[in-house]
Image (cartoon, helix red, strand yellow):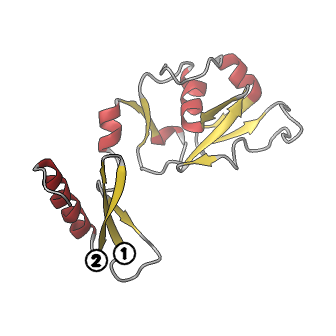
Amino acid sequence: MKAKDPQIDVCVLRELLSYEPETGIFRWKRITSHRVKIGDIAGGDYIAKGYKSISVLGHRVRAHRLAWLYVHGSWPLHDVDHINGKRDDNRLANLRDVTRSVNLYNQRNVRGTHKREDLKKNPWSAHISVKNKRVHLGYFPTEEDAHAAYQNAKRAICMGINT
């Protein structure tokens, strides 16, 4: 159990919600507020940074961590990684308890790059943080070009050259 995990008893969780391991969907088994009906999908509207979250006993908890608790009876020891990289895919087969370094290694994006779907020409942008400020490095035709710009800026910063 990580320090941020709330004190939710697995038996209480199972009384309040059902979990479908094949779909990753939670449904309410009890009425907990005037907005909740039995059978409703839990946490449908609560998405932060791509993760689904559910309010349980006054605690907002990410659904993938609740799924782990629900199935295994205890909180995960480390991070719960989405194997396919889709943060809202909470099927049990897509979840694994891994260390932070393994979880970060599984990230799909290349550091310092971001793709803008609305741009056809040069859709890849590069950025870097300098003294807690995000610095835009430009737009590029490929992810590799954007990453190269990030690497050059990182090298310049490490050598003490202003970017």
| Residue 108 in sight from this viewpoint | no
Tag 2: amino acid: Pro
Tag 1: amino acid: Pro
Residue 71 falls left or right of residue 128: right
Rendered residue at 65%/16% (across/down): 9
Asked whether disc 2 touches disc 1, contact meaning CB atoms under 8 Å apart, the reply is: yes
Q: Secondary structure at mark 2?
A: loop
Distance CA(mark 2)–CA(mark 1): 6 Å
Where's residue 15, x and y in %?
75, 23
Q: Residue furthest right?
A: 34
Q: Which residue is mark 2?
A: 141
| Residue 138 in sight from this viewpoint | yes
Q: Residue furthest bottom?
A: 121
Kindly identify which numbered label has been placed on residue 123: 1
Where's residue 107, x and y in %?
35, 48
Rendered residue at 70%/50% (across/down): 45
Image quadrant where one finds the C terminus: bottom left
Quarter where residue 145 is shown: bottom left
